[in-house]
Structures are given as C-alpha cells and as structure tokens.
Image (spheres, rainbow, N blue to C red):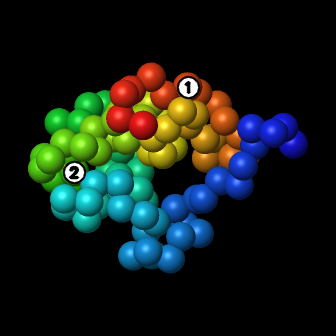
Amino acid sequence: MSSLAVQAQHASELPVCMGGEFVCHCHQVTEAELRLAIEETGATSIEEISVGTKAGTGCMSCHCKLNRMLCGLSPNCGRFGLCGQCGCAEALCVCNAA
Ligand code: FES
C-alpha cells in the first residue's frame, strides 16, 4: 500500500445517524442519503440534489463536497479525494475551501 493510501471511511461504517457523517450540516443530510438521492434521481447538479434533500440550500459551504460526490468522489474535501473502494488518494481537489 502506498504512503498516500489511507483507510477509507465508508458511509455504512460510520455510526453517526446510521448514514455516515453529515455532508450538509445546515439540513443534516448524510453522505448515504446523498448517494441514494444521486443514484435514484440521476442528479448531475447541486440544484437537482437539493430538490429532494435540501442539501446545499443553506450556507452553501458544502457545495465543494456535493460537487465532489456528483463526480463520483468522496465528499471529503481537502488536498486529495479518497477512493471510496480502496481508500487511496485518487484526485486532487482544486477548490480553495481546504
Ligand atoms: S452545510 Fe450545506 S448548505 Fe450549509
């Protein structure tokens, strides 16, 4: 395993709300709820995700995470996004939020 590999935290492994950590704190929407919404609706934008979940319609600080999820990445914002399967760093986050 490379030095960049870390243990991924899958939504199903996290105890908070049984759906993983909150991605949108304003509306208390979890990663699992967002993944389900994206999967079920085929949402491709924050506006489409927010229709059913309200995620992203408050302070908007979660938009980076929502955009990452829409790209199929972990919502974890930071220097690197982590692969949801193996936990290895897979993409460089280019936002300025981290
Ligand atoms: S944290 Fe999502 S809108 Fe504020």
Q: Residue at x 45, y 40 (%)?
A: 77
On screen, 78 above or below 36? above
Q: Residue at x 71, y 55 (%)?
A: 7
Judge by depth and name the residue closer to the eye, 37 or 79. Answer: 79
Element at label 1 = strand
Q: Is mark 2 within 8 Å of ligand 1?
A: yes
Disc 1 residue type? Leu
Find numbered disc 2 in the image and state the secondary structure of the residue it sits on: loop
- Image coordinates of residue 30 in percent, x first then y, are 36, 61
- How many labels sit on residues? 2
Taking the image as drawn, is residue 23 in sight? yes
Can you see residue 40? no
Which mark is on residue 72?
none
Q: In the rendered view of the protein, which quadrant contains the N terminus?
A: top right
Name the residue beneath numbered marker 1. Answer: 92
Mark 1 Cα-neighbour bin, 10 Å: few <14, some 14–19, many ≥20: few
Instruction: Mark 2 vs mark 1: give the one in front.
Output: 1
In percent of width and height, residue 93 lies at: 49, 28
On whether ligand 1 comes within 8 Å of the CB at mark 1, the answer is no
Closer to the chain start, of discs 2 and 1, is 2
**Residue 33 or residue 39, whichever sits in front:** 33
Say if mark 2 contacts mark 1, CB within 8 Å. Answer: no
Q: Residue at x 65, y 53 (%)?
A: 8
Residue 14 % position (x, y): 53, 70
Check disc 2 and report the residue beneath it.
Answer: 55
Q: CA distance from mark 2 to mark 1?
A: 23 Å
